[in-house]
Image (cartoon, helix red, strand yellow):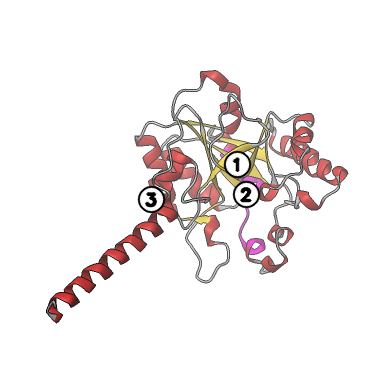
Amino acid sequence: MLPLKFIKEYLLIEAILILLFIIGIYYSTRYAWWRREVDELFPRILMYHMISSHKDGAKFNKLRVTPENFEEQIKYLSEQGWHSFTVTELIEQGDNLPKKSIAITLDDGYEDNFTTALPILKKYNFKATLYLVVDRFNNDWSIHRKRSNLTGELKREVKISNRQVKEMLQSKLIEIGAHSMTHKNFHKLTLDKTKEEIEKSKIEIEKKFDTECKSFAYPFGFYKDNDWKLVQKLGFSSAVTTDKGISNFKEANKFLLNRITISGTDNFLAFSLKLKTGKRGLNK
């Protein structure tokens, strides 16, 4: 019979191996590092919302990418030779796009897109598409997704002014896309109401900012089966969803383009894996 000392050492080693196995499974599931990399010939579209510090106890910190992380990410893209385009430029370049093409998108229209994101984009000469909610002031659209979101948090978040939008356009780095009039849930709207949200947002943006509005982003990423045909009919050349992943532009529906969600909770490993595969973990 083995001495008690050796039995204890054996059990300790066994416990450590089991723990390492559990940790390995956790990180493999969380990051899916084994997932096959998507060819860099396929453009990436990155989705951001706010570029700001997290707030204690806030519900929507996942929408807040800190300025430090945002700059780290843009700097990395620049150093790794990624070519920056707006979404419309990706569409218009077509087969002439170089390898490692990317578009940054900013959804909703928060003031920090102007005060914080724009200086960083200028520093690295990177472009972005700002998907703007026209009636964004005093609007807590989060309740259109879930009634439990009725906290007023997004309503209190300072939105970008029309003057600031015009300054962003003057930088020549920003494209303004439409994100509907009021950020309603398209699943709950009639065809006529959906058409109004899409069509009027394009008209208002082009009138207010004297610019062509060619790209659309579905509010919450929600769309009904034929909504993309409506977007196309109303004069847009592309539309983005919140469906996670990387679209093959040669085969994809240009009005149902996937995006890579960049979360305020992503560390740099998560960001780099998303850039390669379109997702972090099994489905994020």
Whole-angstrom CA distance, mark 2 to mark 3, is 25 Å
> Is residue 155 found inside the magenta-colored segment of the image?
yes
Whole-angstrom CA distance, mark 3 to mark 1, is 24 Å
Tag 2 and tag 3, C-beta contact below 8 Å = no
Q: Position of residue 55 (x, y in %)?
A: 51, 66
Q: Position of residue 61 (x, y in %)?
A: 53, 61
Per the image, the residue denoted by label 1 is 130
User: In the depicted view, which residue is nearer to us: 148 or 93?
Assistant: 148
> Is residue 245 found inside the magenta-colored segment of the image?
no
Magenta stretch? 154-168
Per the image, the residue denoted by label 2 is 109
Per the image, the residue denoted by label 3 is 268
Residue 236 position by quadrant: top right
Residue type, numbered disc 3: Phe
Residue ID at (53%, 71%): 57
Tag 1 and tag 2, C-beta contact below 8 Å = yes
Magenta region, mostly helix, strand or loop?
Answer: helix
